[in-house]
Image: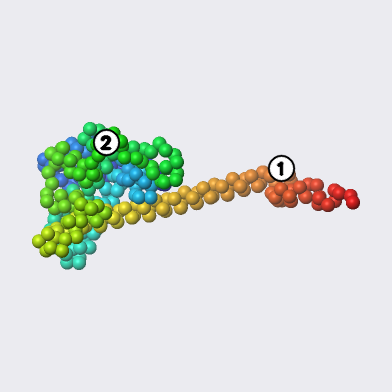
Amino acid sequence: MTQLTEQQITDNYKTLRKIINDTFSGLRLDKLNHMYDDLEDRMVVAPASSVEHYHNSKVGGYVEHILHVIKFSQQIKKVWEQAGATIDFTDEELVFAAMHHDLGKVGDELGNEFYTPNESEWHIKNQGKIYNVNPEIEHMDVTDRSFFLLQEYGIKYSKQEFYGIRLADGMYVDYNKPYLMTSIPTSMLRTHLPIIIHQADMMATYYERDMWKTGNKKEAKKVEQSVNKIKKAVDNEVKEKFNTKTTDAKDIFNELFGEAKKWFIF
């Protein structure tokens, strides 16, 4: 897996904080900055998932994922606008929901990380399980913990933002089905924000998975090139040592000592 550099991790977090300061204002901005200051040490290094073939299971993966979801949600919103769909939410609400849909993956209010590095080499190698859920953290759904952390810092959110965060996982979780599967007109969603957030989240997830696959291919290519270089160096050393043009053991023997049949008298 291609890891983020220290500079990339730092730059990503600075970008996230800039988005916060450019998007929000007043008391809400103050409280958001307070929360991000408190969570910074964990947030900067947090992964976005525990398994490498999910998405961004690497140091700094969480912040990078959030930046992707923000970017893609803004792009998808424009597609909806161009299609003539009703946009019944503000840009601030869009960014807020995208930014906090996975907040619970940072950890809890007590300072516990949500993910901890997996110490089992077998599980890392055979299952790609890079992280484990921290056994010290009290069990809580990621989305529920996102809301809990926001209220812990006194950060209010609109109804649209609530739906955007609550339904970000779409039909992947059962508790979203009553919101998304109803055929009763009065029970159907009255905002498109959660649909756009879910689409952006899925787009980011698949994009990050593609980057993981590409990174693996590049790493495999590098390994192959390194192996070939080593083989070539060894071949040259063998040829030089035995003053021969071949590295095949049988051919070297024949070049040095002649055909085997010449050594036997019948």
Q: Tell which residue pokes out farthest to the right in this image.
A: 266
Q: Sort mark 2 into few (<14), some (14-19) or many (20+) by Cα contacts within 10 Å.
A: some
Looking at the rendering, which quadrant does residue 196 occupy?
Answer: bottom left
Q: Are marks 2 and 1 in contact (CB under 8 Å)?
A: no
Closest to the observer, 27 or 43: 43
Q: Sort mark 1 into few (<14), some (14-19) or many (20+) by Cα contacts within 10 Å.
A: few
Residue of label 1: 241
SS class, disc 1: helix
Closest to the observer, 214 or 261: 261
Q: Amino acid at mark 2?
A: Ile
| Image position of 27 (left or right of 134) | left
Q: Tell which residue pokes out farthest to the bottom in this image.
A: 83
Q: Is residue 92 visible?
A: no
Q: Residue at x 12, y 44 (%)?
A: 156
Residue of label 2: 137
Where is residue 131 drawn, in percent x and y?
36, 41
Sequence-first tag of 2 and 1: 2
The disc at residue 135 is: none
Q: Residue at x 38, y 47 (%)?
A: 52
Closest to the observer, 16 or 112: 112
Q: Is residue 247 visible?
A: yes
Q: Amino acid at mark 1?
A: Lys
